[in-house]
Image (cartoon, coloured by chain):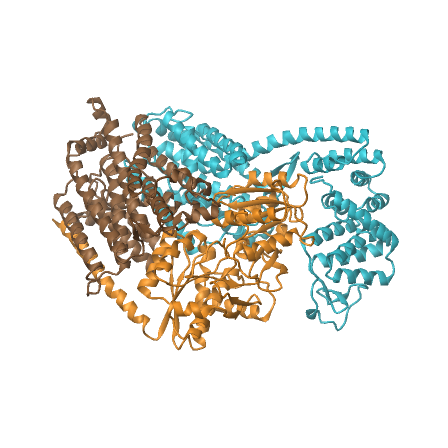
Chain colours: A orange, B cyan, C brown
Amino acid sequence: MKRRSFVKGLITASAGSVIASPWVARKAFAAAHSDTVKLGCLFSSSGTMANIEGRLNYVARMAAEELNAKGGVLGKMVEVVTTDPGSDWPLYAQLGRQLIQQEGVAATFGCWTSVSRKSVLPVVEQNDALLYYPLHFEGEENSKNVVYLNSPPSSSVLPAVEYLMSEEGGSAKRFFMLGSDYVWPRTINQQLKGYWASKGIEADAWREEYVPVGHSNFQTLINEIRAFADQPGGQPVVILTVVGNSIPDFFREYVNQGISAFDVPVLGLDALEADFEGLDTTALVGHLNCWAYLQNAPGARNQEFLSAWANYVNANGVPYRPDVAIDPMVSTYDGVHLWALAAEKAGSFDVPAVREASAGLTFACPSGYEISMTAENTYVKRGVFIGSLNESQGFDILWQSPDTPDPVPFSPYMNA
Amino acid sequence: MPFRFLRLQGFLAAAILLLATLVALPAAAQDRADIVAEICSGDFAAQQSALSRLAGAGVEAGSEGALWARRIVEAFEGRSLRCGDGLAVIDTPDGPLRASTLEPAEGVDTSTLSAPSVNLRLRAVAASAGAVLRLFTEESVAARAEAAAYVDRRREALTPEILAAAVERETDAALRDTLSTLRASLLLADPDPVNRIAAIEAIAQDATLRNRTAIAEALAGETDAAVLAAGEKAMAGIDRTLALGKVLATLYSGASYASVLFLAALGLAIIFGLMGVINLAQGELIMIGAYAAWFTQEAIRAALPGLLDYYLILAIPVSFLAAALVGLLMEVLVIRRLYDRPLMTLLATWAISLLLINTVRVTVGSQNLEFYQPAYVSGGFPVLGDFIMTSNRLFAIAVALFAFIAVVILLRRSLFGMNVRAVTQNRAMAGAAGIDTRRTDMMAFALGSGLAGLAGLALSPLYNVNPGMGTGFIVDSFMVVVLGGVGSLVGAIVAALGIGQINVVIEPIYGAVAAKVLVLLLVIVFIQWRPEGLFAPKGRR
Amino acid sequence: MAKIQSDARVDRPLLFRIVAICLLALIVAVPLLGGPLSGSALGLTPYLANIIGQIATFALLALALDLIWGFGGILSLGHGLFFAMGGYLIAMHMLKAGYVYGGVTPDIMTFMGWTELPAYWFGFESFPYAFVLILLVPGLVAFLYGWMSFRSRVSGVYFAIITQALTYVAMLLMYRNDTGFGGNNGMTGFSTLLGVPVGAPGMVTGLATASLVVLLLAFLACGALMRSPFGRLLIAIRDDEARLRFLGYDTLWPKLAAWCLSGVLAAIAGALYVPQVGIINPRLLAPEVSIEIAVWVALGGRGALSGAVIGAIIISALKFWLTGFVPEAWPFILAGVVLVVVTLLPNGLLDLKPQRLLAPLRRNRKPAPEPAE
């Protein structure tokens, strides 16, 4: 009998909580109409992405504090609601729904991987919400509900590959594409192949290999890279699109097999300062990456940003390094400010109005470029940097674009 | 002499540059100023030619000139050269020096100057030029030999003339021979067929694909029959070595992957063989072992920095004991309550793995740990052809062998080992014969856990060490255990070698994913056909 | 060690009825509160309705696993495989239907550079065809694998780990882009289901109600089945398979039938789940997802259908609730709950009696037996 009564109690309790929840929701709704405006964050602070993605939550908060210090947006204080999707893709959609429907956020900042963005995309489209997405990505998407803060391949990867093919960049003639097996690497490699074909480069000048996400044993593949490099036909390079923990694993084996950046430079498209924490980079000096921001970007604006981040980390006990800043952090930071500018211009937090006001906005990005939102879609024009890995796990700037190239969402090389 | 290679275009460029340098002999101060100005110009071609002229300074400018050139090259490479406004200084801790004279540059504010950009190509030329100049300026034979080995790999700034001068000046007989061979190998495009044949033979001494390509490219325009014959013969020889090297490389890759599998599976094999319990937290015990190694490293770094190179050896007992202790606690607190419910043990050990991962994540953080890599786990040795034996994997193989031998001795020669074997074969009979089976279980569980910790230590130079590092091991290591036959150590080692080798053979053909999928499917089907594994256990369970 | 289990816990008749009645009440309440009454004091937001729908599919999944583990004594750590199969099949239907009738090009075609979908996508625009496949494909896979394993008498821990390895293999395969199922991105961007736009107002409550209805039907049907002679036979196999074989029973077919039924039910759960979350990707095939399913069942109590349903509801509701505001604590809570349950409550929450809590170490509990190995 007692057992039954327990179970009954349990059922009553859960029914009670179900009934109570709408009340909680309404309370949240009421809060949205008070003197604050909410921004949502959808970045994982647990799971496989936690180490790199989690820091973006704090950058969004830092940017919101900057806004609040200047009196908020449209007279309202900005409140950042963070969630933890735990690197679990369906959970991004779930929590996105919660932020938009329950919390009533004015805009959402979130996602690192393409798949997490694809997961949230239907949610923001169905609710006509705004998602600010801070990563460079594969392009081939143009939703009016997503602000693409970072570059599609046309304005990040292609300039870097062009540089490698120039005389100054080493006259690269042959390409070994190695990627994690998912959309971003595949799309980029597809576009690169189209690009090379358009330059008259024969198909035997490249090779394409994929490893599972999270792959760690690169012995065989690096043997093959060596064999590929030693064949005739000109300077070889590796276009590396493996992600996450595969990056340090790859480089460790690369060094141990005695290949230096002089022999076969690696263009690590997803390689960030944070990926080399834990590696001795003296033997890796000279490998390349390309982003719309590098920590060594010149200019006072960058120094301002770096010291703001260091202060924020130290003041709030943030569990990330105060002296490392990566591109997606800056993109998130830009995103919060671009949203605020748009809301001020529109005089409203309504998504259609904010979207309309966004066209043509400019912002002084820490990268040193005056970045601007395009008028015809929700992309952002950013500058491009090519970095060269140095001894202290950072990237020196080898080359940077003279201006901010136009982002091209749909690559002409895709099906070439 | 590793990585010997030759690049034709490099040679041609060098030959052209030699002509240029013969015309303009840089000895005067004006020449130095010109060279510095070229390096500062930011123009890629000018920078490149300036670097080549600097490399030639040893031949032409006497040793004082060589020392100056070396200073400039090193400053350029190390980005301590600062240029701007017709001014070039070397930034040193004691203040800036004028680049062309090396005199103190007083009143120069270096913060207004910038370092000339060093792209990959220039960096390579600068590294090569630096090594060439070391050949001319170093006092000790060892340092010159090291420089010779370096220019052998990095020939961007090298010309036959420079080497001829170096041979001339060299006092050490062995090094002179090395340099002569090196010089001979540069003459692949020499007008004299005799020199070309000598070059081919010199190159072929080091049988790598890169050298084969160099010979093949040189032969493409060759008309001299004798040279062609020599080239064909050299290439055939290289091909034989390469083929053998490739077989060895595949075997080594397979063995190294097998050592990883075996290390991960060894502890599991003992525990599962003895108790029929699957420990899903085995991967996390590996993680604990790796973290223990890291803490040992930090402790040694703080207390006995002189012993830092040996931390991996000193950490062996620490990693073993740390994981064994965690295992012991698991056994006492949870596992022993679940002896007749093995399926529940699965869930319980899974919960423990979740707990361990998240405890480490919360206390230490989720980032990859930075491990110091002593010489014996970094780099590799070229063995034959293009086969390079990487040290970190050799270390893992050595630890796997050590663990295997230690466990075999423990099980065959000790009382505890006898008890374990007895309980594995027939628990009831062993109990009746007076063996404390519960205690044996406990000790064996701790042993199996400790071995996982040892695996963590051995894998730390190979893998990223972070809280989630262990999750990938469980399916693979269980496959090794069941394929080998429950409770059979020899089975485990054979299964690990088999899986490792098949994987390595399939991977280049169908890719890493397909290799893994095929191997797993193979094992799954095999188990349906022969559930007792390769080496059938003798016990009754 | 023959274990005689007189108390074959198919029925706790009262509990069984309470669960059934609660489900029925929800079936009535959800469409009402989420539809006409959504503006009232007790109105359901679409967000909550969606969560209720998702939890119902989890409960169905737990029910499926309980059938084979609780009653057949066979633990599968690979039920994520069947769940994902159902999910992928319905996702293929929705994408293909959106493509054929709505002109929405699936993402996979874009990034793989395909001008048409591979041949095995043929016919997926038809719902009846997709529905038949949702029953057939998982059933067939379950049959083949079960037939092989049960015939060679692979059981217990072996069976559990091999199902996990199989799921792992499927995960590796599905992560590959060239298999044509979307790789890591999986499938998303669904536009219509059964001709109704996915974003339509009634869609969320409709799917939630449908999930609840299917759950209730499956619950009642499984209850009836387990009380039937077939169910008795299955329980007997669980308790002592060797003896049953000596008595002349063929134990292969009852096990296989239960296993296939379980796989199909899990697939149906997956087919209901995916339209509600709007995405499927190989993550569902990750080993920990399948283990979590077993945790629901173990927590609620294996061998009692109501236990499985209650376990799934409690854990997933807790997860939804807690990951919202204490995400860091959730793994600790889950691990703690599992450890407490497996060490102190061998039969899950159904063991929960006050006197047990007072004397947790008492020896005379009767855990549901596992097959002798």
Q: Position of residue B236 (x, y in %)?
A: 71, 28
Res C169 quadrant in image: top left
Res B201 quadrant in image: top right
Res C367 quadrant in image: top left
- C298 sits left or right of B519 in the view: left
- B428 sits left or right of A85 in the view: left
Viewer-nearest residue: A202 or A366: A202
Q: Position of residue C156 (x, y in %)?
A: 30, 33
The image shows residue A310, relative to residue A265, as above or below, that is: below
**Residue at image coords 75%, 54%:** B48
Q: Position of residue B481 (x, y in %)?
A: 41, 32
**Residue at image coords 70%, 61%:** B116
Residue B437 visible at all: no
Residue C138 visible at all: yes
Q: Position of residue A30 (x, y in %)?
A: 29, 71
Viewer-nearest residue: B276 or A148: A148
**Residue at image coords 42%, 75%:** A72
Viewer-nearest residue: B44 or B208: B44
The image shows residue B66, relative to residue B454, as above or below, that is: below
Tell me how many marks there are: 0
Viewer-nearest residue: C336 or A397: A397
The image shows residue A42, relative to residue C103, as above or below, that is: below
